[in-house]
């Protein structure tokens, strides 16, 4: 990406539009992760956006979350056009020089009122004065864009006169590599050298053999592949001290390309070339949600509760993207590493099923879409029958150690006394059984459940419980 160019679709997003729209329709707020630079400094990469429904008509100057071409972008509303077909809205990022295309009212999903940054909630100033100032800044950016053609001619003239134009252009974005990050072929680095009088900067591209060319007498090539930034800095500075008395270097990353991640499964392919299943480079320290969002997002058939991440060493991380997005769970949003394999399964492949048997009106299989408790499972099976025992409902679960666990829930106490602890949270594979009368032994429970379950699903869950 050339210096000064701004991407217009850099707000990290996840294809959870049905969930997002449902929350906004109910008047609730939602938090979404943000990435990219098109709304700086108002919104920075790593912020979380607090989005609420619009109250009345959207006003120019407000920041709107808009759905465009299957993705979600947070940009500022700068203009409202009234046409025969209705109102149409034009938006623009705070750091952009040109506005977006017009969108319809139904594409505006809500407005951004706050950002969460470093654990603090920072409100967006929506006072009339602040909105006018924001619109004035964006108008100045649009006027500046018209002068770019003349600027190109001026820069070319300066270059012909031998004058460097580096001071007139914005520096490319750089990343400070983690201390344990090891450079790999394809990475592009920026080496800044201070010799006590001036700063020189060189761009280094690591070749397939791990070397990079440095145009300084006495250097030629540097061996950088597989080395960390501190190791490379020590070597470069020790060699430069033979030339300069005073020396300091800064080694940053312009583009991560050597470290790659494999993406498979229910991933959306868009018009962009860097989306969909495939083998993609890591553009710096990147978390799972941001990576999926930047490469198309999940399809509507994706099982977002069971995204699997397989590390190079064979270890497996199972991530629940609902918790990652709406509960900000870092355990479900890990930082990716070189060689990771990400698989987004489909709902058809999943085992997100709860088995409800016994004295219910419609015994059968219930699918978990996000989370589910005992009361919801019973309700989705038509409720408890007239002969069902409300005081001793059996819930068979598998613990994290793989052993069987049996719990007894008193739903009557839940209804009459508000004992919410009786509303047990269910997990995929759980079995709920509503008996007629008092519960006997564990073997009695299995002997009752097994024939009923056989008519609905296979017995692999029962066998697993009985073998533990």
Image: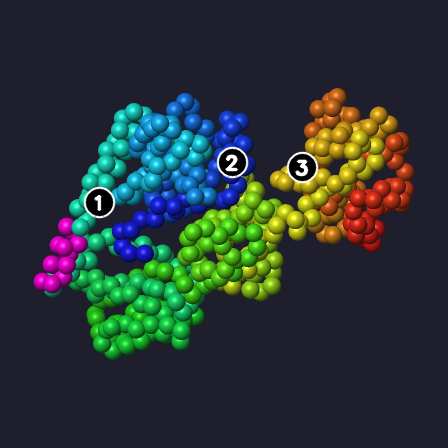
Element marked by disc 1: helix
Tell me if mark 1 has few (under 14), some (14-19) or many (20+) residues whose alpha carbon lies within 10 angstroms of its own. few
Classified by dominant secondary structure, the portion drawn in magenta counts as helix
Residue located 74% across and 24% down the image:
415
In which quadrant of the rendered view does residue 420 lie? top right
Element marked by disc 2: helix
Residue 454 pos. (x, y %): 83, 46
- Magenta stretch: give its range: 150-161
In which quadrant of the rendered view does residue 250 lie? bottom left
Residue 145 bears which disc, if any? Answer: 1
Residue 358 pos. (x, y %): 83, 36
Q: Is residue 102 left or right of residue 394?
A: left
**In this figure, which residue is indicated by the disc labeled 2?**
20
Q: Is residue 85 magenta?
A: no
Q: Earlier in the sequence, mark 3 or mark 2?
A: 2
Q: Earlier in the sequence, mark 1 or mark 3?
A: 1
Q: Nearer the viewer, mark 1 or mark 3?
A: 1
Q: Is residue 151 magenta?
A: yes
Q: Is residue 27 left or right of residue 207?
A: right
Q: Decide if residue 248 is in sight here.
A: no
Tell me if mark 2 has few (under 14), some (14-19) or many (20+) residues whose alpha carbon lies within 10 angstroms of its own. many
């Amino acid at each position: 990406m050339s210096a000064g160019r701004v991407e217009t679709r850099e707000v990290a997003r996840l294809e959870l539009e049905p969930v997002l729209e449902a929350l906004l329709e109910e008047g609730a707020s939602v938090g979404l992760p943000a990435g990219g630079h098109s709304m700086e400094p108002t919104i920075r990469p790593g912020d979380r956006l607090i989005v609420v429904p619009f109250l009345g008509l959207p006003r120019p100057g407000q920041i709107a979350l808009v759905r465009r071409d299957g993705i979600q972008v947070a940009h500022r509303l700068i203009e409202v056009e009234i046409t025969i077909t209705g109102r149409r809205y034009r938006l623009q990022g705070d750091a952009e020089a040109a506005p977006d295309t017009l969108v319809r009212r139904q594409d505006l999903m809500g407005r951004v009122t706050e950002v969460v940054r470093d654990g603090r909630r920072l409100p967006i100033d929506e006072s009339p004065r602040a909105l006018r100032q924001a619109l004035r800044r964006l108008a100045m950016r649009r006027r500046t864009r018209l002068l770019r053609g003349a600027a190109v001619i001026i820069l070319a003239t300066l270059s012909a006169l031998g004058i460097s134009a580096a001071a007139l252009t914005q520096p490319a974005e750089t990343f400070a590599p983690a201390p344990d990050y090891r450079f790999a072929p394809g990475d592009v680095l920026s080496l800044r050298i201070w010799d006590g009088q001036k700063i020189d900067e060189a761009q280094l591209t690591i070749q397939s053999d791990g070397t990079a060319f440095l145009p300084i007498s006495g250097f030629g090539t540097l061996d950088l592949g597989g080395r960390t930034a501190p190791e490379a800095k020590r070597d470069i500075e020790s060699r430069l001290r033979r030339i300069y008395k005073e020396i300091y270097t800064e080694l940053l990353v312009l583009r991560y390309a050597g470290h790659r991640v494999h993406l498979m499964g229910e991933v959306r392919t868009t018009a962009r070339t860097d989306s969909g299943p495939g083998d993609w480079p890591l553009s710096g320290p990147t978390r799972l949600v941001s990576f999926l969002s930047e490469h198309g997002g999940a399809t509507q058939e994706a099982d977002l509760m069971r995204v699997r991440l397989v590390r190079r060493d064979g270890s497996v991380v199972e991530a629940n993207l609902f918790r990652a997005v709406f509960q900000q769970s870092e355990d479900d949003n890990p930082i990716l590493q070189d060689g990771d394999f990400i698989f987004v399964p489909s709902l058809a492949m999943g085992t997100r099923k709860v088995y409800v048997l016994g004295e219910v009106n419609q015994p059968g299989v219930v699918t978990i879409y996000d989370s589910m408790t005992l009361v919801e499972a019973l309700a989705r099976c038509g409720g408890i029958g007239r002969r069902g025992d409300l005081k001793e409902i059996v819930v068979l679960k598998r613990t994290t150690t793989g052993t069987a666990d049996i719990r007894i829930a008193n739903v009557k106490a839940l209804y009459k006394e508000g004992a919410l602890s009786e509303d047990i949270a269910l997990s995929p594979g759980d079995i709920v059984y509503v008996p007629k009368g008092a519960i006997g032994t564990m073997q009695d429970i299995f002997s009752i459940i097994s024939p009923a379950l056989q008519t609905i699903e296979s017995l692999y869950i029962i066998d697993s419980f009985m073998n533990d």
